[in-house]
Amino acid sequence: MSILRLLVLVAFLAAGLVVGSLNPQKVVLDFGIAEVVTTSGVAIMVSLLAGVLLGGGIVMATTVLPLQARLRRASRPAPPAEVAEEGPRPPYQGT
C-alpha cells in the first residue's frame, strides 16, 4: 500500500511541475494592503491547494467530527443496572 501512495504522490508532484513550467507568465495578485508578484503556474497550484484544504476542512467539521462524536456516544458502555435488595419489600404506605 505504501508503494501505491508513493506513486500517487510522485504523479501529483510531476503534474504540479508540469503545470508550473507550462505557465511562466507573471501575475500580480492585489490583496488591497499588499501585492504579490508570481507566475500563473504557482498561482494555479496554490489556489488548488487552498481549495482542497478548505474543502477538506469543511467536510471534516460538518460530517466527520459529528459522526465521530455520535460513534463515541454509541460505543460508551451502558451504566450498571441497580441491584435489587435481597428479601421482601416493605408494604406500601400510601397517603
Image (tube, rainbow, N blue to C red):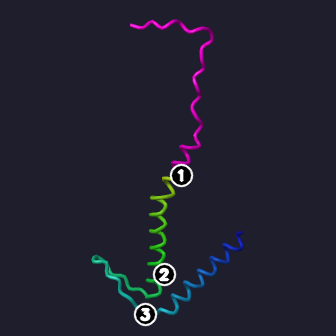
Q: Nearer the viewer, mark 3 or mark 1?
A: 1
Magenta stretch in the rendered image: 68-95
Q: Nearer the viewer, mark 1 or mark 2?
A: 1
Q: Amino acid at mark 3?
A: Gln
| Neighbours of disc 1 within 10 Å: few (<14), some (14-19), many (20+) | few
| Neighbours of disc 2 within 10 Å: few (<14), some (14-19), many (20+) | some
Residues at marks 3 and 1 touching, judged by CB atoms closer than 8 Å: no
Q: Give residue 51's position: percent from left, percent from top.
A: 45, 73
Question: Is residue 76 part of the magenta span, yes or no?
Answer: yes
Mark 1 and mark 2: span between their CA atoms? 32 Å
Q: Amino acid at mark 1?
A: Gln
Task: Looking at this view, name the residue that lies furthest to the left.
Answer: 32
- Assign the N terminus to one quadrant of the image: bottom right
Q: Give residue 21's position: percent from left, percent from top.
A: 52, 91
Name the disc covering residue 88, or none. Answer: none
Foreground of the two, 33 or 52:
52
Foreground of the two, 81 or 49:
81
Q: Give residue 9's position: percent from left, percent from top.
A: 62, 76
Residue occupying the point 63% across, 12% down: 86
Residue occupying the point 59% across, 81% down: 13
**Across the whole image, how many numbered discs are drawn on residues?**
3
Which residue position holds label 2?
45
Q: Quadrant of residue 28?
A: bottom left
Which residue position holds label 1?
68
Q: Give residue 49's position: percent from left, percent from top.
A: 48, 75
Which tag, 2 or 3, sits closer to the chain's start?
3
71 up-or-down from 57: above or below: above
Q: Amino acid at mark 2?
A: Met
Which residue position holds label 3?
25
Question: Is residue 92 part of the magenta span, yes or no?
Answer: yes
